[in-house]
Image: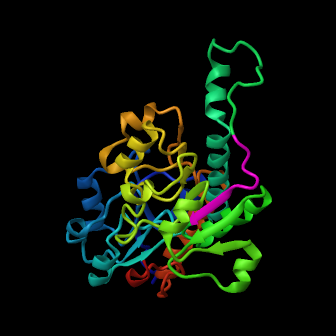
Amino acid sequence: MPTKRLSVVVTRRLPERVEARMQELFDVTLGPEDRPMDRTELAEAMRTADVIVPNLRDRIDRALIAQAGPNLRLIANFGAGVDHIDVATCRERGILVSNTPDVVTDDTADMTMALILSVTRRIPEGLALMQGEGWQGWSPGALLGGRIAGRRLGILGMGRIGQAVARRANAFGMQVHYHNRKRLRPETETELGATYWESLDQMVARVDVLSINCPHTPSTFHLMNARRLKLMKPEAVIVNTSRGEVIDEHALTRMLQAEEIAGAGLDVVDYSDGISADLRALRNVVLLPHMGSATREGRAEMGEKVIINIKTFADGHRPPDQVFAGLL
């Protein structure tokens, strides 16, 4: 007798080849259009499916998990970050959680460097000028930025992405400094040419560019708060390709308005309050719609990871990318 195929609900449309492969392997429900599921739809999916495939827009909290049906045994997240999922409550209910690590490392590190260059070299201002009617020709004093070679880069969070950023920064001639929950091995520090700071406050006060590459957890919420932001040099730049919640966005906006921080490159914001109109209006901010992992190759590899996690689970084994609450 053939084995019953797993019922899988995917909350957003994925690359066509990923969807096609899923449909070959599982009983897949896809939305008719690419839009976020509302909470009612998400609750219904959790009541009926064996597996759901959510993304960072789907907030799966304790109240929603309480509505899960008896068949739901795996949440196979499409993405590396799982701060939108209450992993501890899932564990209490016997629901496994998996993610898609590693595949977005280089893409996100590339975007980090793109933002550093965009802010320090004022690329968006130049683009806007050329797309408008105001350009009067080249001038020696127009749109002067600063070179990044020789500048101190502080990396907050020296995991896979932070280390990939360090390697790229080395190629640009930047001095790499970092703060991390755990210090790297000496040989890794040597390879990266990275200087460790036990005190985040001391590092923040001395760097020219600060790159946020730590995950969003309860311990990192507003890690860059108003007090810590005020430690930064007025000519310093902050770049965030991690999660908006790591920075106190209101404090950052006030300091950017007052030119107490020179600029910011933000691929993420705190979406819980919507995107601040004040932040949008600032000329010294490069604001992007969470594009760090947005490559065709990356999305396809994320989908393959999701499929492997579900298939391994269907075969009676733990998903290779299972997330454990105690390690967040």
Q: Magenta segment, which residues?
A: 146-155
| Residue 75, quarter of the rendered image | bottom left
Residue placed at 45% from the left, 58% from the top?
Answer: 243
Locate residue 13, reporting x and y percent.
48, 51
Q: From the image, which quarter does the N terminus lie in?
A: bottom left
Q: How is the image coloured?
A: rainbow
Whether residue 24 is visible, yes or no, is no
Which of the pair 14/99 is nearer the observer? 99
Locate residue 322, reporting x and y percent.
47, 80
Q: Viewed as shown, does residue 58 lie left or right of 187?
A: left
Which of the pair 229/114 is nearer the observer? 229
Count how many numbered circles sit on residues in the image: 0
Q: Viewed as shown, does residue 79 lie left or right of 92?
A: right
Classify 251 as above or below 218.
above
Q: From the image, which quarter does the C terminus lie in?
A: bottom left
**Majority SS type along the magenta span:** loop
Q: Viewed as shown, does residue 21 lie left or right of 146?
A: left
Classify 321 as above or below 131.
below
Residue placed at 73% from the left, 65% from the top?
Answer: 167
Residue placed at 29% from the left, 58% from the top?
Answer: 42
Which of the pair 52/132 is nearer the observer? 132
Locate residue 189, reporting x and y percent.
70, 78
Is 136 magenta? The answer is no
| Residue 57, quarter of the rendered image | bottom left
Whether residue 152 is visible, yes or no, is yes
Is 151 magenta? The answer is yes
Residue placed at 55% from the left, 66% from the top?
Answer: 203
